[in-house]
Amino acid sequence: MTDIEIAKSIKLEKITKIAEEIGISEDELELYGKYKAKISNDVKEKIKNKKDGKLVLVTAMSPTPLGEGKTTISISIADGLRQIGEKAILALREPSLGPVFGIKGGATGGGYAQVAPMEDINLHFTGDIHAITSANNLLSALIDNHIYHGNELQFEKVVWKRCLDLNDRQLRVVNTGLSGESKIVPREDKFDITVASEVMAILCLATDIDDLKQKLGNILIGYNKKQEPIYAKDLKAEGSMAVLLKDAIKPNLVQTLEHTPAIVHGGPFANIAHGCNSIIATKMAMKLADYCITEAGFGADLGAEKFLDIKCRKANIKPDAVVCVATIKAIKYHGGAPKDTIKEENMECLASGMDNLYRHINNLKDKFGLNVIVAINKYNTDTDKEIKYVEEELAKRNIPSSVVESWAKGGKGAVDIAKKLVELCKKEEDFKFIYDLNDSVIEKINKVAMNVYGANKVNYSEEAIININQIVKNGYGNLPVCIAKTQYSFSDDAKNVECKTPFEFNIRDVELKAGAGFIVVLAGKIMTMPGLPKVPAAETIDIDKNGEIVGIF
């Protein structure tokens, strides 16, 4: 059966019952039908004095184009912990419509390890991402309206971009204001995908509605003729933007196919944004259960680094254990096997590709000082010989591992790793950040590029240096950095999957996200508005005469 067929074959519990299991009453929910709900602001106050549960971060080695199943593993671990009698909850990101209709498909897990209702979550869900799109574009409309009506703030340069939650490369650079109307000012504009919008990052990093408004007001939207910054609060935009986000800031409660509670909230990409779900959702989940399982996007060089260096600083949290997901196909892919042969047995490429996995593990253990276990996500194309080889090689380095069969078995396929995680969470850690906030902007970028990615040199474009100097001049040099780069390589080159030889890391541009509180660093050819593949998933998604959706995977 397909993922969507499996999801439809299992009867869900009413969301009120799921909420009751974690101490949330029906009066503290805002229902969106029978199986999804928003959690009211009252719950946060009610549980604030409860002890935090253990936090488990799920990350991965560098992926293949179709991903390595981090969300599936996260779901099965939470289900597996409940299988052994532990109280567990998930804290995951919301899917973006870009990948759903693009190449990766949905982001609700797979097989018997899914959050549900999967069609709803993968499509419009509770409207959070649409609200973010609207708030982002309201600010754009206010900027151009201000310029139209006389430009009192003397905009010389607009840096704020519009957004849309679909992959559409045609919108990367556009010309606007071409109607020829009197007084309208044509200008060049750009679009980001919504999950790369600063409004998305702000929603995920805000602690409450007041903090949300303050962060929205601090968004840098342009510069005047004196090269002084102009902020959203100068347009009095933060109030109306917050109104559009008043419901989106509330976490969403759903369930797994095994009825484990799941809070799904916020959805920034990790290759072009900070890649973590909301602080509100994670901290709430930690109060509601003994184990909170969360994930950060793409490989550990992206999602995990940003989770640790950005989110953990801002939320004052740290993981008690990290799961690094590996697949046989990804190991072979990063060992030089062509993409169309990674399902075939190839022990030479498997041996070579182990280096990618080791580098991620060493970063997590030695650079960040965390407890790590490898989840070998088993596919039906994997051979016993390949699985045994990876297990034995990890054991030689004293790296704990577990074969997880989550797609086929759900929580039962993750009982072994669940037991190992309970013990791993008891061990002491020596958690540390990669850089200090007092380091210069260039020092911070260099430390991530050299210590995490393994670059031997970092090159900066002239534009990047100019923008860094302006950021420092305006008093934002002490912010963390959020590096946007390809997910397929430690380098900035998507084709350099092996990274066997020393490589240089190239910084194209740097952007200040004053509202979100970090500096985005654009490396290589990374785009903040993705494009669709030659054969997009949209071609296979359909709805039949009975209203049943098909084709989402």
Image (cartoon, rainbow, N blue to C red):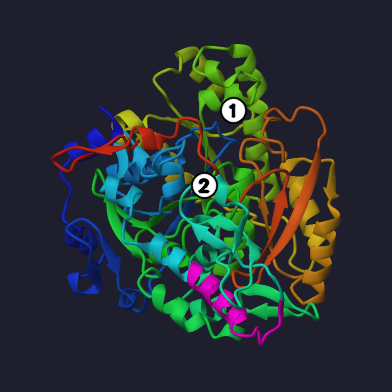
In the foreground, 367 or 42: 42
Query: Height in image: 74 above or below 404?
Result: below
6 part of magenta stretch: no
Residue 8 location in percent, x, y?
Answer: 20, 39
**Residue at image point 42% right, 24% down:** 379
Residue that carries the numbered disc 1 in the rendered image:
394
**Residue at image point 56% right, 47% down:** 170
Q: Secondary structure at mark 2?
A: loop
Majority secondary structure of the magenta segment?
helix
Query: Farthest left residue?
Result: 546
In the foreground, 267 or 277: 267
**Residue at image point 77% right, 77% down:** 475
Q: For this view, does 347 lie left or right of residue 293? A: right
**Residue at image point 65% right, 83% down:** 151
Q: Which kind of residue does numbered mark 1 sit on?
A: Leu
Q: Which residues are magenta?
A: 137-155
Q: Which kind of residue does numbered mark 2 sit on?
A: Asp
Residue that carries the numbered disc 2 in the rendered image:
168
Query: 10 Å neighbourhood of mark 2: few (<14), some, or many (≥20)?
Result: some
**Image quadrant occupied by the N terminus:** top left
